[in-house]
């Protein structure tokens, strides 16, 4: 019998792609999501891509909140076999919103994680992979950034990620048996190559890639480039963009490593190790979609760093994982999704 995993936030952007990779690897999944920032349609399409029928027990969906002990208990009890590990994606992720609404961010991200860990203990499950973020590094002094760089977040969203990492370390240290991986993602972008699942942000996108794809498909007039006077080769900000399928495979590698090893705590960067500027991304996307991307240069965005790029070598050593997909593939697959679904999942 294959192993069962609980995936919180599994209907979201990264969660849906990871669910597909895990189903294809033979796991059974219970997804807990309150659909605050996602659609049940994403999971329907994940099932379809994995070749599962509508009520296939290999993918069970619990509509519920990660802050609710009752909903968590329901998810653990509904599993066809005891849950071996949890992948914890559920959370809120908009930096600007976190500045305006810190209480909500601490509630969902930190209280939600605390309730999840309590439910895991109650059900005898002590293996967890957590969605952390490169946002922890704030304005980094050293690039490429190793995991040993100081944790110095500069906004409430980053503070909640740092708090949950600490909570996980405290819990893992308090009793034997915990297997914990904190995965610090750099900039997840792209989509499944089928174009059936992808990123579908609510409202105006905060991030470069979804904004760009919406300009390309005609939903928005033009992209604003936040500054061309940064100390980078072309003056625009440089980031480490990681294809969401590479990221999904990183979660599979982390789970396999944890489930096959002694109890341990891992903290790993998931990135490509390569930086691309805003103008590089605009150019690559224009090639992929066969049309120019209108843009204008405006002032820098407060809180941005000039350059953030991962040192991903520890993830390669510990997980045997590295990114395989290029910026060209990121843009090709992102366009496959946005062009086939101009309004996303239309929730
Ligand atoms: P997403 O918003 O697409 O997915 C998050 C999912 O969690 C959604 O399906 C949402 O409905 C669900 N959710 C939110 N609050 C919930 C609650 N209280 N109970 C149950 N479910 C809830 O975001 P994503 O891009 O897929 O990110 C997944 C995780 O990765 C998040 O924790 C995020 O902070 C982290 N992360 C994302 C990025 C990024 O740039 N996308 C970078 C670093 C880290
Ligand atoms: N940018 C623009 N125009 C836009 C949006 C972004 O020029 O409309 C620029 C930014 O200035 C930056 C680059 O594009 O130079 C990337 O910006 P994103 O907003 O896409 O990504 P960030 O690196 O700023 O931040 C994102 C998440 C953070 C997370 C980080 C690393 O928002 O929460 O990736 O995971 F911490």
Image (tube, grey):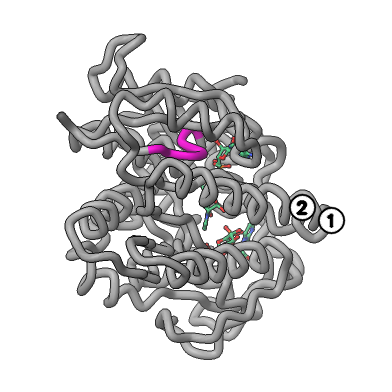
- Residues at badges 1 and 2 in contact (C-beta under 8 Å)? yes
Going 39% across and 22% down the picture, which residue do you hit? 60
Q: CA distance from mark 1 to mark 2?
A: 5 Å
From the top left corner, tell me how far across and down residue 117 is, in percent: 51, 51
Residue nearer the viewer, 292 or 341? 341
Above or below, 218 against 211 in this view is: above
Q: Which residue is mark 1?
A: 100
Is residue 8 inside the magenta stretch? yes
Q: Which residues are magenta?
A: 6-11
Few, some or many C-alpha atoms within 10 Å of disc 1 (few <14, some 14-19, many ≥20)? few
Residue nearer the viewer, 212 or 289? 212
Residue nearer the viewer, 110 or 343? 110
Above or below, 187 against 82 in this view is: below
Secondary structure, mark 2, is helix
From the top left corner, tell me how far across and down residue 283 is, in percent: 45, 56
Residue farthest to the right?
100
Q: Is residue 284 left or right of residue 41?
A: left
Residue nearer the viewer, 23 or 276? 23
Which label was assigned to residue 97?
2
């Amino acid at each position: 019998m294959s192993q069962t995993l609980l995936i919180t936030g599994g209907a979201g952007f990264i969660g849906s792609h990871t669910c597909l990779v895990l189903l294809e690897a033979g796991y059974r999944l219970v997804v807990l999501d309150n659909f605050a920032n996602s659609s049940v349609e994403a999971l329907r399409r994940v099932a379809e891509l994995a070749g599962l029928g509508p009520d296939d027990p290999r993918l069970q969906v619990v509509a519920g909140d990660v802050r609710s002990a009752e909903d968590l208990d329901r998810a653990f009890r509904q599993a066809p076999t005891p849950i071996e590990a949890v992948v914890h994606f559920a959370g809120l992720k908009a930096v600007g919103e976190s500045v305006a609404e810190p209480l909500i961010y601490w509630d969902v991200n930190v209280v939600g994680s605390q309730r999840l860990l309590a439910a895991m203990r109650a059900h005898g499950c002590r293996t967890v992979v957590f969605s952390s973020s490169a946002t922890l590094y704030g304005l980094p002094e050293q690039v490429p950034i190793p995991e040993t760089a100081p944790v110095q977040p500069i906004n409430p969203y980053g503070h909640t990620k740092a708090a949950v990492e600490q909570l996980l370390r405290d819990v893992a240290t308090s009793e034997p048996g915990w297997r914990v991986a904190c995965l610090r993602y750099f900039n997840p972008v792209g989509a499944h190559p089928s174009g059936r699942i992808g990123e579908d942000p609510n409202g105006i996108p905060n991030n470069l890639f979804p904004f760009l794809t919406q300009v390309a498909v005609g939903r928005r007039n033009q992209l604003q480039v936040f500054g061309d006077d940064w100390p980078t080769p072309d003056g625009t900000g440089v980031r480490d963009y990681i294809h969401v399928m590479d990221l999904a495979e990183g979660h599979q590698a982390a789970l396999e490593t944890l489930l096959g090893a002694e109890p341990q705590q891992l903290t790993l960067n998931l990135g490509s190790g390569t930086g691309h500027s805003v103008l590089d991304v605009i150019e690559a996307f224009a090639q992929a979609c066969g049309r120019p991307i209108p843009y204008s240069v405006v002032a820098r965005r407060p809180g941005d760093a000039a350059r953030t790029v991962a040192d991903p070598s520890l993830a390669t050593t510990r997980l045997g994982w590295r990114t395989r997909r290029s910026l060209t593939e990121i843009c090709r697959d992102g366009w496959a999704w946005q062009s086939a679904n101009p309004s996303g999942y239309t929730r």
